[in-house]
Image (cartoon, coloured by chain):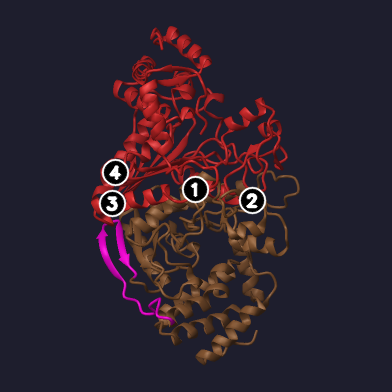
Chain colours: A brown, B red
Amino acid sequence: MPGVEGGIRFPADRLRAWSAQVFQKVGVVKDDAALLTDTLIEANLRGVDTHGVTRVLCTYVKRIQAGVMSPRTKLAVVREHASTALIDCKNSIGQVGAARAMRLAIDKAAKTGVAFVAVTHSNHYGAAAYWAMMAPEHGMIGFSSTNAPATVAPTGGRTAMLGTNPFAIAIPAGQEQPMVLDLATTVVARGRVMLYAKQNKPLEPGWAFDERGVPTTDPHAALKGLLAPIGGYKGYGISLAIDLLCGVLTGSSYGSHFPGFLADNLKDPTDVGSVFAAINVESFMDLPEFKASMDKALREMKNSERAEGVKRIYIPGEIELETKADRLKHGIPIPEAVVKDFVALGQELSVPFPQA
Amino acid sequence: MPGVEGGIRFPADRLRAWSAQVFQKVGVVKDDAALLTDTLIEANLRGVDTHGVTRVLCTYVKRIQAGVMSPRTKLAVVREHASTALIDCKNSIGQVGAARAMRLAIDKAAKTGVAFVAVTHSNHYGAAAYWAMMAPEHGMIGFSSTNAPATVAPTGGRTAMLGTNPFAIAIPAGQEQPMVLDLATTVVARGRVMLYAKQNKPLEPGWAFDERGVPTTDPHAALKGLLAPIGGYKGYGISLAIDLLCGVLTGSSYGSHFPGFLADNLKDPTDVGSVFAAINVESFMDLPEFKASMDKALREMKNSERAEGVKRIYIPGEIELETKADRLKHGIPIPEAVVKDFVALGQELSVPFPQA
């Protein structure tokens, strides 16, 4: 996911305090505002600014103000078995439903070995990694996925029928950091294509289609067209499977039925579905042995022979962790245009946006 | 996966009877020989000849004859919880371990909602789809994945550290056929690159790397190099996650530790690990409602607007199903070179290979 190049650096704590106040001001209860804020700040710290305050805070606030997303939580567990649950988020904050679901999955997996919890009638839940990453500290492997409004066509199609439908998996290690994989099922994000269009730079082959559904390297044609899923029909299949699990199985929206994407629609609930899973390592191997094996496996990967011109081989999640260390020290960069939005929002809500 | 172009057509039943006899002749008990044969014939029927008798029967027989793979099953459940189990395959036939694991997953999911069963110290288990596809007839969503000897480098690397590490997911529908996704985490199979090399035809960008780890479209350089994972670092991450789950978590081999690929090594056990999961639909939604929603979702996808020049939009698994109908009617094509191998093997074992 593209980070923010440049921008003004703000200390994470200052952004956190402001964001929590903003959400409370529009009706989110204190604990939920803190949780919601934490998911956004964590995304910013990890360099995933597309899922941080930078891109979604104002959208969330607008949707709450417009009455399209409920700030108060009325979660209900509508079906439950020893290792599963279905939670109705009732169009409340996606992050609040997600936290409840992942905690429940972890509790259940501690007893039965594995658990799979789904959330229906939910909203954007932030970065998938946040939820998967709750598992490793409990000695578990975490998984989460969500569907999303359609931006991708099936292989051979020209109409958006599937979302970017991301998923994340987090696997604990010992002295090494957990492996944290979080990916959208498209080759590149739309933001990347927009950047190329600005620079009039041709896209790499395999990134996008034009509006006739024909592969293109013209960034302008691609912006009118559709993003390509990873591995062609393979990524289409993965995205479809995620849509069927998160949308159809949970009774949420799916396919082309979404009323519009986050910021584009201030009238209809998003109605996405999300799934969460936890696997208890101890159900398969003693945790210390597993952690030692993970350390060995990850180190072998990192120390394997590099391709010509490559400085380093990364484990998924490593770059994000290093970005976090940097941003905790030097602050989170916020583009100037976003700072202006924040200042205006702060004035509107009488929660002044802090100085950098 | 590439099918077999041309070849001599044999009725599936005749191949099935011969294959079952061959496996019994080298020491596989009757039921296991029938199961093993069924997985291979089913792969051939579905057009996945890379996992059918065509490519693996002789290899399996050689490995059993060489004493590298045990024909007799001594499966042991070494850890078990309400929703999980770890089964030691003890270097016996991968398919026998897989069948036991998937049945156990289905039984457990019927009680607790979801189950996750792993198999350790196993062998090649055929096509992943076969195992996932056991779930839909029980009103469940099935999943399976396996690791494999290394043929893929991590992003930025030049040494094979990961297998093609395929996974499959099968989701039941009503009048529509289940969605069955089965994919390797590389953009193309090695067989495809070999075909292009034979024809001196340049590869598409993004398919492969040369031996220095640099992207190449030269099929000859690619054959000395490595296959590219789908979506670059995304596919690397998926493949790594599968290796950690199937290899490290189960206590099987992983990364670069495999002694060699199937046919290349007649001295050491393969020692792969595999995982199997089942999700009971009724734990989330009444099955008839789910099936009706699935039919609607799949039909919408198939009927969505097509790209220029495209005749049809497929659901994953549809092509395989149509190939199966064709091959049940017209027979399974076996390349002439393979027919010769089968005739020779039949003579060696006194199990004459049948006429077409």
Q: How crowded is mark 1: few (under 14 residues within 10 Å), some or many (20 or more)?
A: many
Residue most toward the right? A309
Q: Picture coordinates of residue A179 (x, y %)? A: 53, 55
Q: Do labels 1 and 2 share a chain?
A: no
Q: Residue at x 43, y 40 (%)?
A: B274
Q: As displayed, is residue A189 above or below residue B66?
A: below
Q: Are marks 2 and 3 on the same chain?
A: no
**Depth check, front residue: A221 or B339:** A221
Which disc number belongs to residue B292? 3
Which disc number belongs to residue B306? 1
Chain of the residue under label 3: B
Which secondary structure, mark 3? helix
Name the kind of residue labelled 1 in the image. Answer: Arg
**Depth check, front residue: A49 or B113:** A49
Whether tag 3 and tag 4 are in contact, CB under 8 A, the answer is no
Q: Do labels 3 and 1 share a chain?
A: yes
Q: Picture coordinates of residue A236 (x, y %)? A: 49, 49
- Which tag, 4 or 1, sits closer to the chain's start? 4
Which stretch did the figure color magenta?
A66-89
Which secondary structure, mark 4? loop
Within the image, what quadrant is residue A49 found in? bottom right
Tell me the CA gap for discs 4 and 1.
23 Å
Q: Picture coordinates of residue B309 (x, y %)? A: 54, 42
Whether tag 4 and tag 1 are in contact, CB under 8 A, the answer is no
Chain of the residue under label 1: B
Tell me the CA gap for discs 1 and 2.
16 Å
Q: What residue is shown with label 2? A: A216
Which secondary structure, mark 1? loop
